[in-house]
Amino acid sequence: MSIHIPTWIDGTLQPVEKLEAHQRGLRHKAISVFLLRDGQVLLQRRALGKYHTPGLWANTCCTHPHWDEDAMHCAVRRLEEELGIADATLTYRDTVEYRADVGGGLIEHEVVDIFVGDLPEGVDPIPNPDEVMDTIWTPLDGLAEEVLRAPDGYTPWLRIYLREHAALIFGPASGT
């Protein structure tokens, strides 16, 4: 199935096939979700069949909205598709941009809407094995150090989020 994602070409958003956007390193829209519970964040280990960064630990959920898809709808949709989670209430935090080599000649140049949510007790992920090979709740107060200690086990974007955007993602929400 060919998925077309919102991609900037010559300053205009255009639908471009997802793999092509990564092959060409084109700037495109994405979403990232971080689910929290009791001072911990839910991480996922990407399935081995993923076309880039297979087997690496990443934030709870990340993907690209389809052409003309709202970012919040995309975040909710992918949480259910990847992790079987339909009961999380998400809050938009901000939009960040990064560019990262993800291996195999692929470049992510993402403009990412960040969403954070609290996952209620009793609601646990049911990973889709085509997307996710494992999940783990990990304490926030040691994650950055663990990623620095063993960076090759984590996706480039998770390393960037922790290094450059941790206060935005994990700090108090705006207006509180």
Image (spheres, rainbow, N blue to C red):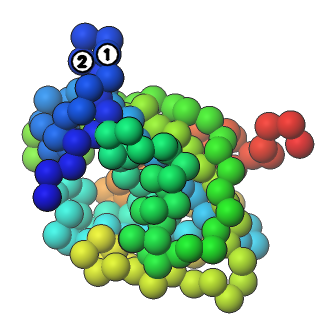
Rendered location of residue 151, percent (x, y): 38, 54
Residue 103 shows in the view: no
Q: Which residue is mark 2?
A: 9
Query: Most extreme residue toward the top, as rendered?
Result: 10
Q: Is 155 positioned to the left or the right of 90 in the image?
A: left
Mark 2 crowd level (few <14, some 14–19, many ≥20, 10 Å Cα): few
Give the SS element for disc 2: strand
Q: How many marks?
A: 2
Rendered location of residue 85, percent (x, y): 53, 75
Instruction: Check disc 1 and give the amino acid type.
Output: Thr
Front in this rendered view, residue 156 or 73: 73
Query: Most extreme residue toward the bottom, as rendered?
Result: 122
For residue 134, above or below residue 144: below
Rendered location of residue 133, percent (x, y): 32, 78
What's the CA distance linking mark 2 and mark 1? Answer: 5 Å
| Residue located at (46% from left, 71% from top) | 80
Mark 1 crowd level (few <14, some 14–19, many ≥20, 10 Å Cα): few
| Residue located at (14% from left, 51% from top) | 2
Front in this rendered view, residue 22 or 142: 22
User: Is the Cβ of the residue at disc 2 closer than 8 Å to that at disc 1?
Assistant: yes
Q: Which residue is mark 1?
A: 12
Instruction: Check disc 2 and give the amino acid type.
Output: Ile
Q: Quadrant of the C terminus?
A: top right
Front in this rendered view, residue 35 or 79: 79
For residue 27, above or below residue 119: above
Give the SS element for disc 1: strand
Residue 28 shows in the view: yes
Which picture quadrant has residue 27? top left
Rendered location of residue 134, percent (x, y): 38, 79
